[in-house]
Amino acid sequence: MKILISAYSCEPGRGSEPGIGWNIVREVAKYHQVWVLTRPDESSEVIAAELEKNPCPNLHFIYFTLPIFAGSWRWGNGAIHLHYYLWQIQAYFVAKKLQRQIGFDIVHHATFGRHSTPSFISLLSVPFIWGPVGGGETAPKPFWKDFSFRGRVYEISRDLLRRLGEIDPFVTFTARRSALALAATEETAQRLRLLGAKNIQIFSNAGLPKADIARLSEFSQPDNNNIRYVSIGRLLHWKGLHLGLRAFALADIDNAEYWIIGDGQERENLSELAKELNIADKVKFWGILPREETLNKLEMCHALVHPSLHDSGGWVCAEMMAAGRPVICLDLGGPAVQVTKETGYKIPANTLEQSLDGLTKAMVHLASNPKTVQIMGKNGQARVSDVFDWEVKGKTLARFYTEVLNQQTESELVDIDTANLSSTCEK
């Protein structure tokens, strides 16, 4: 097929949105001819260098940026959203011209993956695939009482901006125009249904290259003399690390440690909380570490604690499963899609007390059952290989394309038959 993919953010060797964009276009190009709409900025040189090392004849990049405010995406969070919206409008006109020249079978919006912002390439008269998109996740209200004033303002602003996006008529049109909408989480799937999307599949935006999976699978099992739990990521209020600390204190496990890798505005608050809970001697804040040093630390840990309250992705869960470690998370967002009862613990998040109790019991159970750690670890590695390997995800996308095109063909045949029947009746 001839596939057009819109990837505002796309760069090899990166995580998050740039990594999603790159891995999608690279994997799809193994099966089809792919044209990619993206920005030049810094990524064009990195992409050119990667393609020189690993050529991909099916992959064609079309770089463009706004004629005005070209660099406004660097001005801050608000500016990048405006730049992104305007760039999407420009992408439609670029795509429309390409469609006349090439004749695409399918158009696919890959990044940014946010359900509350439209994709204007959905205006083309070609089957449109949207996603994976996230952003429909919200921190449950019972958990807000632990947030600082700044945290509550952030949550209110986030919800308001999302709702404003959802009343944008172009967002509604994008959802209704989609032949297939890929939701990164169940929460986002619910928002897409309300927007009018008819065909929705849960498709996690988390994925790992085969080389990363192989590297993580080489991790040795840590000794059981000291049980180590680890959390990794930005130290923000909605990451829920205060819940991890409280649960760790309630677990009161001998010879246990809790390592936190990362930095952010909650670092000082979390450190003070550890002192209040009398666990400061068992909690280690490592700050931001280089990739290799981070991997060395992770190899020394037994389980990941990831109590995020609204996370579309949570890639670290897939990474730790690939490393053969169980994951303890809340039954929310992206982690809830990745983790199963065979690979870890998904704790219900209806009330604060319920979640703390579940997190605590999971920590205690893992500490007293080394065999469970090993079994869950092996199950996690199998799940990552079966579901979250980017090669597997590329095959899944290729299957989605075929299904969408077949549905389109069947729909056109029905329309032709209906028209013929109508004409016969008139005669």
Image (tube, helix red, strand yellow):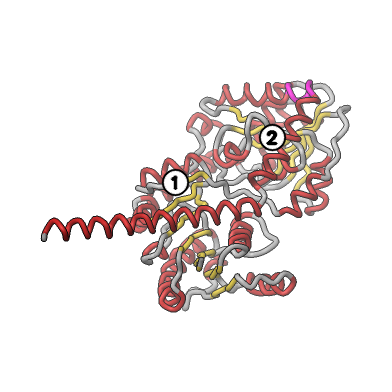
Which percent across, then down, holds residue 23? 63, 59
Judge by depth and name the residue closer to the eye, 217 or 258: 217
Examine the image and state in which quarter residue 321 appears. Answer: top right
Residue drawn at x 57%, y 43% is 311
Q: Residue at label 1?
A: 200
**As drawn, 254 above or below 241:** above
Main secondary structure of the magenta stretch: helix
Q: Does the stretch in magenta take in 280?
A: no
Examine the image and state in which quarter residue 327 appears. Answer: top right
Judge by depth and name the residue closer to the eye, 261 or 225: 225
Category of crowding for the residue at label 2, using alpha-carbon neighbours closer than 10 angstroms: few (below 14), some (14–19), many (at least 20): many
Per the rendering, the mark at residue 327 is 2
Range shown magenta:
364-369
Kindly report the distance in space between the C-alpha atoms of the residues bearing marks 2 and 1.
27 Å
Category of crowding for the residue at label 1, using alpha-carbon neighbours closer than 10 angstroms: few (below 14), some (14–19), many (at least 20): some
Which percent across, then down, holds residue 26? 63, 63
Residue type of the residue flagged with mark 2: Val
Of circles 2 and 1, which is in front? 1
**As drawn, 109 above or below 339:** below
Which percent across, then down, holds residue 315? 65, 46
**As drawn, 415 above or below 221:** below
Mark before the other along the chain sequence, 2 or 1? 1
Which percent across, then down, holds residue 113? 51, 54
Please tell me whether mark 2 sits on a helix, a strand or a loop. strand
Please tell me whether mark 1 sits on a helix, a strand or a loop. strand
Residue drawn at x 53%, y 53% is 399
Image-based side of 50 in relation to 196, left or right? right
